[in-house]
Amino acid sequence: MDNFKRNNEVYWIWGLFSGKENDFLNNIKEEVQDTLKSPNFQCHITLSGPFEKVDKKFLNKFKELKVNNFSIPLKVNGYNYKKEEFESFFISIKNTKELTNLREKIYELKKFKFQRKYSPHISLAYGNHETSKKHFLISKLPKLPIFLRVSRLSLVEVNESKNLWNIIEIF
């Protein structure tokens, strides 16, 4: 994010998974976290944020954005890792037109500044871990599908200094 400084208490919009996909991702996350110690969090893709405040008007508009049969395909690039605490080990996702359009709609709800710099991913572990451990993990994890589907949106209150991710509402 452009000039983004991590803040203690902010809000983010996450995309969540359902059913078999959620179970599949949680199994992978558990296997990863057996090797890479990490705080616990729900499998998700971060779609937008951070927002210092969200009000009732924003929430009502956000609920309208979510239609009954909401679903967005995510093109999977594969496992990856970085030397960043909150992108330590993850599943890389292609930044598609559908994903960009959804993010733009979320940012337009309250006229937030749209963040063009975006590295879509599904985190599997947070923390500072040895590169050799991460590289080894990739070789033993299951093959990923070509696509995963986000089927729900959520508003999440985040306090990264305390490793707390509290889903306030799921749409």
Image: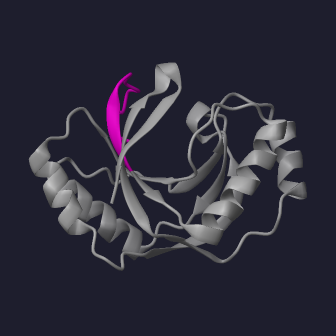
Left or right: residue 92 compared with residue 3: right
Q: Is residue 168 left or right of residue 160?
A: left
Residue 167, image quadrant: top left
Location of residue 23 in the rendering, given as x and y in whole percent from the top left corner: 67, 62
Q: Front-most of 50 and 20? A: 20
Q: Position of residue 17 (x, y in %)?
A: 53, 63
* Residue at 42 percent of width and 75 percent of height: 71
Quarter of the image for residue 79 reads: bottom right
The quadrant in which the C terminus is found is: bottom left
Give how far across and how far down residue 118 sits, in percent: 43, 53
Apparent side of residue 83 relative to residue 134 in the rendered image (left or right):
left
Whether the magenta-drawn stretch holds residue 40 is answered as no
Which residue lies at the image location 37% right of the left edge and 24% below the top edge? 7
Query: Which colouring convention does the figure follow?
Result: one colour
In the rendered structure, does residue 6 fall within the stretch colored magenta?
Answer: yes
User: Residue 105's spot in the image, x, y percent?
Assistant: 23, 64
Q: Which residues are magenta?
A: 1-13
Task: Classify 66 as above or below 134.
Answer: below
> At 25% across and 52% down in the image, what residue appears?
114
Task: State the image quarter where residue 159 is shown.
Answer: top left
